[in-house]
Structures are given as structure tokens and as C-alpha cells.
Amino acid sequence: MTTTVWLLIASIILPLTYFAWSLIGFDRASGHLIRSRLAAASNPQPGGSELGPHRLVILARKLTPTAYVSRLDRMLGKAGRPASMPLDRLLTLKPLAALGGALLALLFGGARSPQGVVLSVFFIAACYVVPDLLVYNSGTKRQARLRLDLPNVLDQLLISVEAGLGFEVAMARVGANGSGPVAEEMVRTLQDIQAGSTRRDAYKAMAARSSVPELKSFVSAIIQADVQGLSVARVLKPQADQMRIRRRLRAEEKAMKLPVAVVFPLLLFIFPPLFIVILGPAVINAIATFSGR
């Protein structure tokens, strides 16, 4: 067999051997103990020993560059850190996806020619990147919804503060009664403050978890008001007005772009059938006339 075939076989056999070893070496008793301790986290037992993560997670972190892990962590932060896809699971899922791509490439004869080997390598790389694309897509949708809901949340905060509530109490009310990414970020920020973080650090962390400029501007204004001792209501009112104006301008911009976006479907999918229906009988009659039939 050629060298490329041996390389493809090695790319499949070695990961399979590693995964089999990780499954055999997994301490199920320790895993059960971890789950029981997590369930009883409210009543921790003193003197207990700390148990580390799974060996597969440790190896995945060692094999993945630190900068790439940090990038994935930021992407998960923008996606709201879904419970079904934590960072450790994402790091272990990517090699599994690449392994599945390698198996498919071998089954479909990717090692029969140099072109097939190149396509197989690209297919394996694509399978490795697919989880990143899914997380990125989820984060993009969440950031778009956050930008859309932010003006309404600021109006609720302004009404609550003007009614006499403190800013953190207003955030707690919005987080408890609201739904969506903005309410989740409010709850997460309050949890950071309760965990011991300063208000400034918690607000900066909320801005770092988002790519929306409006939210970053709002956080900067709140931090300045907290540092300088200004009234939060006086800061929230211009922020809410500005958010509503920006949302209206974005809607007007989309409305202005709509005619340009409709041109291409008209030219490609509507005009050709219309021409066929209108000019088709005339062309058939003309052909029949000139052919002498």
C-alpha cells in the first residue's frame, strides 16, 4: 500500500485507540461521586478532596492551543454559554467530528488518488470546524436579538428607577420578569456581584460577553455614573432615547435596502418565466408561419 493509505489508516487507528483507552480508564465511581457532590453543593462536606476533570477533557485541553481555547470561550460567552455545549464538551466533540469525517472519507475511497487525499483532508478539517460554526451562528443570532431587545429593557429599567427602585433591584426585576438574552445578562451580572465581584468588574464582564456597541455604550455610562456618583435615572434617560433612535434608523436602513435586494430575485426567477408565458405563444406562431406549416 502507498504512504497516503498508511497515513489515512493511522489517522483513524490512533484516535480510536485513544478513545478506547479513555473509556476503559474512566473511573465511573469517581464520576458518580462528582455528580452526587454537585447535587449536594448547597451542603458541602468539610474536608472533602477535589476531583479533577475527565482525562479526555484534560488531553483535549493539552492538544488544543491556549489562544484557540480562549477564542472558543469568548464565542460561547457571546452565545450565552448553552448548557448543552459547555467548553469542555466542545473541545472533546471537535476531535470526534474530525474522526467521523476521516471514517467517511475512507469509506468513500478518499485514498485512491492524490486528489481524493486532498479532498479528504479538507473534509476532515471542515468536520473539525463545524462545531465552531454552530456556536458562532448561535452567538450571532443571540447578539442580534440582544440588540433588538435592548431599547425595551432600558425603558423598563428607566421606569423602575424613576419609580424609586435602586438600579440593582431594577435589574433583578427585569431579569426575573423578562425573557431573552438581555434579561439573562442582567441576571448573570447580579450573580457576579453576589459572588464577590465589584460592580465595575461585573459590568465590564457583561460588556465583554457581547459584541453590541449599544450595550457597551450603556455599560460605560453606568460605570461613569457609579464612579462619579451621578443619578442613574439621568444617565438612563438619554441612553434609552438614543437606543430607540438607533433602532428606528436601523429599520429605515433595512427598508431602503429592500428594493435593491428584490432586484436579483426578479431578474433570476420572475422575469424569465414571465417572458416565456407572454412571448412563448407568439414565438411558436412565428416559427409556424415562417416554416410554411
Image (cartoon, grey):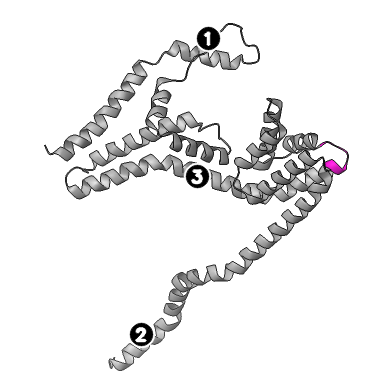
- The CA span between labels 3 and 1 is 37 Å
- Residue 263 horizontal/vertical position (percent): 51, 72
Q: Amino acid at mark 2?
A: Ile
Residue at 26% in and 41% down = 105
Point out the frontmost of discs 3 and 1: 1
Question: Is 248 inside the magenta-drawn segment?
Answer: no
- The CA span between labels 2 and 1 is 88 Å
The answer to whether residue 147 is above or below residue 169 is below
Which residue lies under the disc numbered 3? 136
Neighbourhood count class around disc 1 (C-alpha, 10 Å): few under 14, some 14–19, many 20 upward: few
- The one of 239 and 31 positioned closer to us in this rendering: 239
Which residue lies under the disc numbered 1? 49
The part of the image, by quadrant, that contains residue 16 is: top left
Which residue lies under the disc numbered 2? 284
Neighbourhood count class around disc 3 (C-alpha, 10 Å): few under 14, some 14–19, many 20 upward: some
The reply, left or right, for residue 48 in relation to residue 172 is left
Badges 2 and 1: C-beta atoms under 8 Å apart?
no
The answer to whether residue 205 is above or below residue 49 is below
Question: Is 164 inside the magenta-drawn segment?
Answer: yes
> Which quadrant holds the C terminus?
bottom left
2 or 3: tag closer to the N-terminus: 3
The answer to whether residue 276 is above or below residue 139 is below
